[in-house]
Image (cartoon, rainbow, N blue to C red):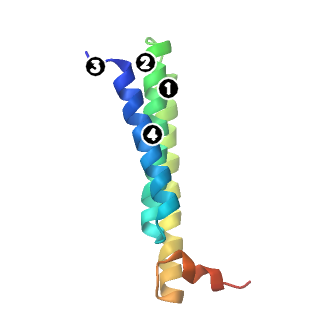
Amino acid sequence: MVPVVFYLVLSALLFFIGVWGFVTRRDLIAMLISVELILNSVDMNFAIFNRMLFPDQLEGFFFTLFSIGVSAAETAVAIAIIINVYRRFHSDQVNSIENMKL
C-alpha cells in the first residue's frame, strides 16, 4: 500500500507546476492547461482526504466528480473564447488581447 504522504506530495507538485505554468506562459492554451493541472490537484486532494478521514463515505469522490464536470464545462467555454480571440487577432498570445476595447 502506498502511503498517503506520497499522494499529497504528488498533488502539491501538480499544483505548483500548474501555478508556475500559469505565471510564466503567455499563450492562452498553455495557461488553460496550467489551470487544469491546478484543478486536477484539487480533485486529488478531495479524494485523498475523503479516503483518509472518512473511509466509509463517498462525499469526497462526489465532490471530485462534480469538480471534473465543472472543469470540463470551463474548458469548453475557455476554448471557445480562445478560438474567437484567435479569429479576431490571429494570435493566441495574451499580449494581443491587451488591445481589446469595449
Cα gap from disc 1 to disc 2, whole angstroms: 8 Å
- Above or below residue 43? Residue 73 is below
Task: State whether residue 72 appears in this view.
Answer: no
Q: Nearer the viewer, residue 73 or 100?
A: 100
| Mark drawn on residue 41 | 4
Q: Earlier in the sequence, mark 3 or mark 2?
A: 3
Cα gap from disc 1 to disc 3, whole angstroms: 19 Å
Placement of the N terminus among the 4 image quadrants: top left
**Callout 3 secondary element:** loop
Q: Amino acid at mark 3?
A: Val
Q: Earlier in the sequence, mark 1 or mark 4?
A: 4
Q: Which residue is mark 2?
A: 51
Left or right placement of residue 101 versus residue 15 in this view: right
Q: Earlier in the sequence, mark 3 or mark 4?
A: 3
Which residue is painted at 52% across and 59% down in the image?
23
Q: Which residue is mark 3?
A: 2
10 Å neighbourhood of mark 1: few (<14), some, or many (≥20)? many
Badge nearest the viewer, 4 or 2: 4
**Callout 2 secondary element:** helix
Which residue is painted at 28% across and 19% down in the image?
2
Q: Which residue is mark 1?
A: 60
Q: Nearer the viewer, residue 28 or 72?
A: 28
Q: Position of residue 8 (x, y in %)?
A: 42, 28
Q: Amino acid at mark 2?
A: Arg
Q: Amino acid at mark 1?
A: Gly
Left or right placement of residue 1 versus residue 78 in this view: left
Badge nearest the viewer, 1 or 3: 3
